[in-house]
Amino acid sequence: MMTNLFSVFDPTSTILSLPLNWLSTFLGMLFIPSLFWAMPSRWSLMWSKVTNTLHLEFKTLLGPQHSSMTIMFVSLFSLIVFNNFLGLLPYIFTSTSHLIMTLSLALPLWIAFMLFGWLNHTQHMFAHLVPQGTPAALMPFMVLIETISNVIRPGTLAVRLAANMIAGHLLLTLLGSTGPSLSTSILALLIIAQILLLVLESAVAIIQSYVFAVLSTLYASEVV
């Protein structure tokens, strides 16, 4: 592993000569069996309430006729939020801080939406390139702008998630690395600041997962 500030984001680290870092992506699956106990725990009840709330919200965005698609976006939210939270624990690789991970989530979804829209709703997709009420002189520019806006969507989704994860982790690493050189009184303030940052990062982990899932749902609603 690299011995610098970015070592926590090094995907080439190995254990027993095997690249096992990316296996942390699937650690969230360890929590799934607890949902099927006869007497669910408070954690299971809370998570069921969260997924049901997301299902209803995504159903509203997609429409009742496409409500079955919500399971895909709820699963996407679950995968991202588990990885974001697990990345806050020591010695666990944060896969959502890498573009290879976030692009692997955003790009296939965007390609699938575009193919579905252009193959099944071609006229609607052409009409979407020119907003209603656009003057005739501006139509070529609006088509260009809307096309660029559509093309960069997977990139903005991926970069937004990865950048937010990297920023928080780097700030925590920077503050933590200054601890050994500080006096006891300042060290106490640093610990308090670290705790507050961890709370903030927990909120960011949820918000970024929600934003990724909602934007993906909105992109899907435009083509269905």
Image: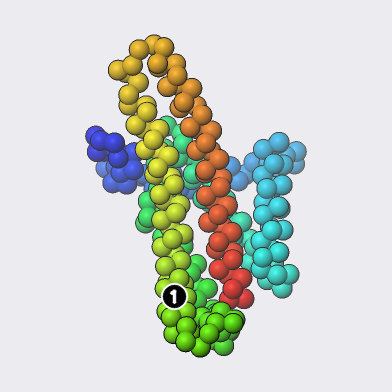
What residue appears at the point 69 percent right and 67 percent down from the top-left corner? 67
**Which quadrant holds the C terminus?**
bottom right
View extreme (left): residue: 3
Give residue 9's quadrant in the image: top left
Give residue 41's quadrant in the image: top right
What residue appears at the point 36 percent right and 32 percent down from the top-left corner? 173
| Position in image of residue 187 (x %, y %) | 40, 17
View extreme (right): residue: 39
| Position in image of residue 40 (x %, y %) | 72, 39
What residue appears at the point 66 percent right and 44 percent down from the top-left corner? 47
| Position in image of residue 202 (x %, y %) | 53, 38
Give residue 38's quadrant in the image: top right
What residue appears at the point 63 percent right and 66 percent down from the top-left corner? 69
Q: Does dot 1 land on a helix, a strand or a loop? A: helix
Give the labeled residue for mark 1. 145
In this rendered view, identify the residue nearer to me: 187 or 105.
Answer: 187
Q: Is residue 56 above or below residue 114?
A: above
| Position in image of residue 177 (x %, y %) | 32, 26
